[in-house]
């Protein structure tokens, strides 16, 4: 892939700060375009291949092995490429982990973790809050000592990065009952997976919808420790079953073939063009630091999150005078800075700085913000 694919603003591609489905690397889209009509001389598109064809199986296996390499996923973990969005995992996780009884414990830090809790509670009742940032208005995550599991905890679920609130954990929680025994740690990593290195061995289950940092919508990646495959409830829909998905190589039925292929191109881009997750981490830190510094340097813009827990991927901010919101959005869009409108539940602005958003986009945004303030402040 071309080195400059993630560089400056191309004449036809604007800077896209969408929270999801989100920006994809230009180099990935260029390669997909080049392979679209005729994949490697086979005379057909990846979209038109049988998922059982040797060529497609090779694409799928390469994607998995590249993801394993990027995240250094230990051999005792299964990697599943499934569907239904992260939201389906809100149900699949309790179905897969509550077969031996016990209660699901949750750390709630905003909208997504509360939705995960609500779904488990709707299905099986008895979900329990082990810690919450509700009392502080979700501006700082609970500290490690504040996370207290129940004696009958079956697992602990948390959301590493709250995409809407812009609140991110600065540590990996310990999942231990009061008697000191371990339970599986389950993480919704939808909006921060692959933003930097991660110690996968600390987790029982990781899941992530693709449309933020992996690829196009339609695909969910699940990483599950293999000793957890025998804890499923008998009444589980077969498509939810981590054991069945694993046995079938994620092909119980037709998978999201094209999304899986594009995810594979993104993994190759991370490895070959970016240089791995260590390099990605440094770029992401620089991008986020730049934007938060611009917000903090001005009375015109503000972000309420405690510095330790400010999300690197999703940066919400408000204008001191919300009457200027409409003008800010119209002018930023005209300047080629797309999708800066905040989530409907929060208002204001949100700039999502996922892996595929180049540093040049952040520079352009910071320049626009300074200029807008000068003209309207
Ligand atoms: C986007 C998102 C979801 C929901 O994803 P869907 O694929 O739309 O179900 C869940 N959790 C987090 C943290 C997200 O960012």
Image (tube, rainbow, N blue to C red):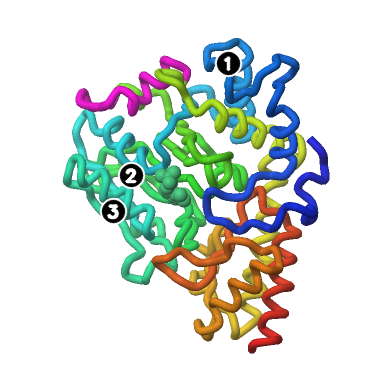
Percent coordinates x, y for residue 350 in the rendering = 54, 65
Q: Secondary structure at mark 3?
A: strand
Quick check: 174 left or right of 279? left
Of 75 and 232, nearer the camera is 232
Separation of disc 3 and disc 2 at Cα? Answer: 8 Å
Examine the image and state in which quarter residue 372 appears.
Answer: bottom right
Pointer 1: what residue?
57
Pointer 2: what residue?
156
Separation of disc 2 and disc 1 at Cα? Answer: 34 Å
358 w.r.t. 104: above or below:
below
Residue located 60% across and 47% down the image: 195
Percent coordinates x, y for residue 184 in the rendering = 36, 37
Numbered label tally: 3
**Disc 2 or 1, which lies upstream in sequence?**
1
Residue located 50% across and 28% down the image: 256
In this rendering, which labeled residue sits more in front, label 2 or label 1? Answer: 1
Quick check: 66 left or right of 204? right
Label 2 crowd bin: few (<14), some (14–19), many (20+), radius 10 Å: many
Quick check: 93 left or right of 376? left
Disc sitting over residue 130 in the figure: 3
In this rendering, which labeled residue sits more in front, label 1 or label 3? Answer: 1
Percent coordinates x, y for residue 216 in the rendering = 56, 40
- Extreme bottom residue here? 377
Separation of disc 1 and disc 3 at Cα? Answer: 42 Å
129 part of magenta stretch:
no
- The answer to whether marks 3 and 2 mark residues whose Cβ atoms lie closer than 8 Å is yes
Q: Which residues are magenta?
A: 231-249
């Amino acid at each position: 892939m071309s080195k400059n694919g993630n560089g400056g603003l191309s004449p036809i591609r604007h800077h896209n700060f969408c929270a999801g489905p989100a920006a994809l690397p230009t180099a990935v889209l260029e390669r997909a375009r080049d392979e679209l009509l005729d994949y490697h001389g086979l005379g057909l598109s990846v979209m038109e291949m049988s998922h059982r064809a040797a060529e497609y199986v090779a694409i799928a296996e390469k994607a998995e092995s590249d993801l394993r390499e990027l995240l250094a996923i230990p051999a005792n973990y299964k990697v599943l490429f499934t569907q239904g969005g992260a939201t389906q995992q809100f149900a699949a996780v309790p179905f897969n982990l509550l077969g031996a009884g016990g209660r699901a414990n949750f750390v709630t830090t905003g909208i997504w973790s509360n939705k995960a809790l609500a779904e488990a509670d709707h299905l099986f009742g008895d979900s329990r809050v082990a810690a919450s940032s509700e009392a502080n208005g979700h501006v700082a995550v609970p500290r490690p000592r504040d996370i207290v599991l129940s004696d009958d905890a079956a697992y602990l679920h948390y959301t590493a990065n709250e995409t809407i609130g812009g609140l991110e954990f600065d540590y990996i929680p310990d999942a231990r009952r009061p008697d000191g025994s371990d339970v599986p740690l389950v993480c919704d990593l939808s909006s921060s997976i692959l933003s930097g290195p991660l110690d996968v061995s600390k987790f029982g289950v990781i899941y992530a919808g693709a449309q933020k940092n992996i690829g196009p919508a339609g695909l969910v990646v699940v990483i599950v420790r293999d000793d957890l495959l025998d804890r499923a409830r008998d009444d589980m829909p077969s498509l939810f079953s981590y054991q069945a998905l694993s046995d079938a190589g994620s092909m119980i039925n037709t998978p999201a073939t094209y999304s899986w292929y594009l995810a594979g191109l993104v993994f190759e881009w991370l490895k070959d063009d970016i240089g791995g997750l260590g390099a990605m981490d440094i770029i992401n830190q620089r991008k986020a630091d730049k934007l938060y510094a611009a917000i903090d340097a001005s009375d015109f813009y503000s972000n309420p999150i405690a510095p330790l827990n400010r999300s690197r991927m999703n940066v919400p901010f408000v204008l001191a005078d919300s009457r200027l919101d409409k003008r800010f959005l119209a002018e930023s869009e005209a300047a080629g800075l797309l999708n800066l409108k905040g989530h409907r539940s929060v208002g204001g602005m949100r700039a999502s700085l996922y892996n595929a958003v180049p540093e040049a986009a952040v520079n352009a945004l910071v320049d626009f913000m300074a200029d807008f303030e000068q003209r309207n402040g």
